Image (cartoon, rainbow, N blue to C red):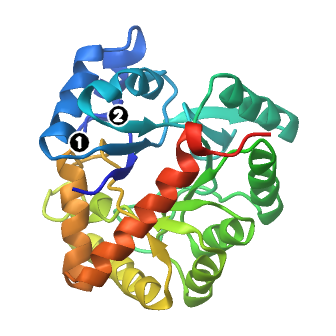
Amino acid sequence: MYGECHAHIFMNGYHYRKAVELHKNHINEQNIREWFTEYEKRGVAFIRDGGDALGVSAYARQIAGEYGITYCTPLFAIHKNGHYGGIVGVGFDTMREYRGLVAEVKRRKGDFIKIMAAGIMDFNQFGVITGEPLGQSEIREMIHIAHEEGFAVMVHGNTAQAVRDAAFAGADSIEHGNYLDRDCIQALADSGTVWVPTLSTIRNLIGCGRFPDEELKKIYDSAAENLRRAYDTGVMLALGSDAGAYRVPHGQGIEDEFAAFKEILGDSTELRERLEQGEARIREKFVYGRRKTK
């Protein structure tokens, strides 16, 4: 099985607040081991976490080797205060504060930097992203600062503008990437940025009753069309399910993600090889011991 290139080990796949409550006062090691067992059963040997504000992914990295898993984490995601991102990380107001957070990740031997460049989808309405994205200059400076410190950068991005700005600024990977356009997809191809589309966060909601299926199907069809276009354009792709998100269970999530890719692109040797290449690029750039340091 492929590695899981986007997970949140502190989340439980069904209720965010309960997940936070479980770890809020003391990290629940038993819960982490339960999720690792699910990955181990499926032969998943690599996990890239998207971070959390509770220290759960940092602890998980310490014990992942017991399950044969190479585990990397940014420790926490970084968002600008007033913008989306508080559920998985730490906020800043000024670039000086942002530099301080990057320095903290470096001091604590985080594997990479994750920045939140945009909001999330409104699953009730096609085409809507909650919150305002960061500006082009902010995204560029944040990526530049992280690269100066020797870190690869994982960018949470939705909307064509935010993703295009991140790709042009040298983002090493883009997560989610909903509602892209042709120019944005070409920018991903030209930059060599790895795209991790996390299709399971949409696909697994269809039929759940929580959101209108008509809107979910529109969102998923749009994501599928963008994936086909990206594949044909030569964008580097990798599998990551956003495991821990609603209805995306740990372990099962990466199997669901691979199933979505095969449904959309067809199962072929070329697809499997390209997914292997995308994962290899992420392993090369995002694992602490392999990244360049100043």
Instruction: Say whether residue 48 is left or right of residue 203.
Output: right
**Disc 2 target residue:** 9
- Look at the image and tell me in which quarter the N terminus lies: bottom left
Residue occupying the point 52% across, 27% down = 53
Residue occupying the point 30% across, 79% down = 271
Residue 73: image location, x then y, percent: 50, 36
Q: For the residue marked with disc 2, what is the amino acid? A: Ile
Instruction: Say whether residue 98 is left or right of residue 192.
Output: right
Earlier residue among tags 2 and 1: 2
Number of other residues with Cα within 10 Å of mark 1, as a class: few under 14, some 14 to 19, many 20 or more: many
Q: Secondary structure at mark 1?
A: loop
Q: For the residue marked with disc 1, what is the amino acid? A: His
Residue 253: image location, x then y, percent: 23, 52
Tell me if residue 66 comes above or below residue 72 in the rendering.
above
**Disc 1 target residue:** 250
Q: Is residue 121 visible?
A: no
